Image (spheres, helix red, strand yellow):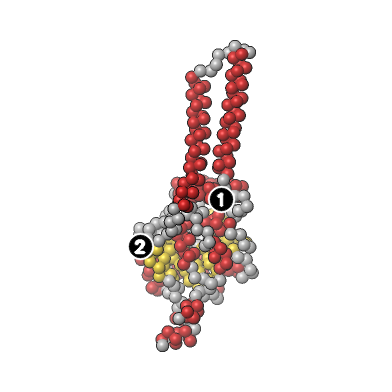
């Protein structure tokens, strides 16, 4: 039985987290199967249902019934994409490599062949870098570009590749290293970069969403940005320190100005308006500093609880098609 399990283990796993993606999953699976067929690798696709409220789970189950190479991981509720992606990586059985891709077809499955080609040259991490972002507005592209460049400046030793999402291929040893990182507040793009290992980019054109609507509104993108910044730099804490120092220096200079004007020029000390301005300014600085400290303290609090990252309601593993199981294994199972 262990020998059969070893023979059945795929060489390549494709992890696909999904939330309310019933409209596109069928087309995605068809294109994925067509793209992976010519690679000459035994493969599986791990669909992770992140608490969807539509028929996403039913669609996944029907895909698995039609193609046994599809595995389904159904989380007990919605945990968010970063956690769902981690759950998929935990359940990926690929012995050689794992690909991460979204189900909305903005990342074309056909690019996986290029990722595999570079991986076969001995590269552990092959990330798909967007050369063109079709279907996105000017504001979205500008804010995304600003975020990546900010992370490159404040990330320190962790260099986040620009214009790069989750779409990538990782060798088995890179995945195993990544899975050792079990922090609650997960910014996967940063964690991908943190593990290191030889990496190379593959350029591609990002397509518009094939169906459905994006699940990332501006508020979620803002929170994701906060996760990225607070997970990989203490820069905001340093900024609060510098701002406090600058404010103190400004207060000293202002006090000297008041003393000189009063003693030398005999000018009256500014009254209520200037006092209120100073009080409100200092109050704003203090509240902002407390907010920054609170962001970091909240993350420490969540980590100390040591809760599991997610709970699985159901896991249906993949199986190789009968034609791919070696004859001795099939005969042993029949016996």
* Left or right of 329, for residue 267: right
Residue identified by numbered label 2: 55
Proximity of marks 1 and 2: CB atoms separated by less than 8 Å: no
User: In the rendered image of this protein, does residue 233 appear above or below residue 25?
Assistant: above
Please provide percent x and percent y for residue 93.
Answer: 49, 70
Please provide percent x and percent y for residue 302.
Answer: 45, 51
Residue identified by numbered label 1: 232
Residue extending farthest to the top is 266
Disc number placed over residue 57 in the picture, else none:
none
Q: In which quarter of the image is residue 253?
A: top right
Q: Nearer the viewer, mark 1 or mark 2?
A: 1
Please provide percent x and percent y for residue 95.
Answer: 53, 72
In the rendered image, is residue 316 in sight? yes
Is 145 in front, or is 284? 284
The structure residue drawn at horizontal position 53% and vertical position 67%, both measured from the top left corner, is 98
Is 43 in front, or is 302? 302
In the rendered image, is residue 141 in sight? no
The structure residue drawn at horizontal position 41% and vertical position 88%, both measured from the top left corner, is 335
Q: For mark 1, does the 10 Å Cα neighbourhood hold few (<14), some (14 to 19), or many (20 or more) residues?
A: some
* Left or right of 151, for residue 287: left
Is 70 in front, or is 279? 279
């Amino acid at each position: 039985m262990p020998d059969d399990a070893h023979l059945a283990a795929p060489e390549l796993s494709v992890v696909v987290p999904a939330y309310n993606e019933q409209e596109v999953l069928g087309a995605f699976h068809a294109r994925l199967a067509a793209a992976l067929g010519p690679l000459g690798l035994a493969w599986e696709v791990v669909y992770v249902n992140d608490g969807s409220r539509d028929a996403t789970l039913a669609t996944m189950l029907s895909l698995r019934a039609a193609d046994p190479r599809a595995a389904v991981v159904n989380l007990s509720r919605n945990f968010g994409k970063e956690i769902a992606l981690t759950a998929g990586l935990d359940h990926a059985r690929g012995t050689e490599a794992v690909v991460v891709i979204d189900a909305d077809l903005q990342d074309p499955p056909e690019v996986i062949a290029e990722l595999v080609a570079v991986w076969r040259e001995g590269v552990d991490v092959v990330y798909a870098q967007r050369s063109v972002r079709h279907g996105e507005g000017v504001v979205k592209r500008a804010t995304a570009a600003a975020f990546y460049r900010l992370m490159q400046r404040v990330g320190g030793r962790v260099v986040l590749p620009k214009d790069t999402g989750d779409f990538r291929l990782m060798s088995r040893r890179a995945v195993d290293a990544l899975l050792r990182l079990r922090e609650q507040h997960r910014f996967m793009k940063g964690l991908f970069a943190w593990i290191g290992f030889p990496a190379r980019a593959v350029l591609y054109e990002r397509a518009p969403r094939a169906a459905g609507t994006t699940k990332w509104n501006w508020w979620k993108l803002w929170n994701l940005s906060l996760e990225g910044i607070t997970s990989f730099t203490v820069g905001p804490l340093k900024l609060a320190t510098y701002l406090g120092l600058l404010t103190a220096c400004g207060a000293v200079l202002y006090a000297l100005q008041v003393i000189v004007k009063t003693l030398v020029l005999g000018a009256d000390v500014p009254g209520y308006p200037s006092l209120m301005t100073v009080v409100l300014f200092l109050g704003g600085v203090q509240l902002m500093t407390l907010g920054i400290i609170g962001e970091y303290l909240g993350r420490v609090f969540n980590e100390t609880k040591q809760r599991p990252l997610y709970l699985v309601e159901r896991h249906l593993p993949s199986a190789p098609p009968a034609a791919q199981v070696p004859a001795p294994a099939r005969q042993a199972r029949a016996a």
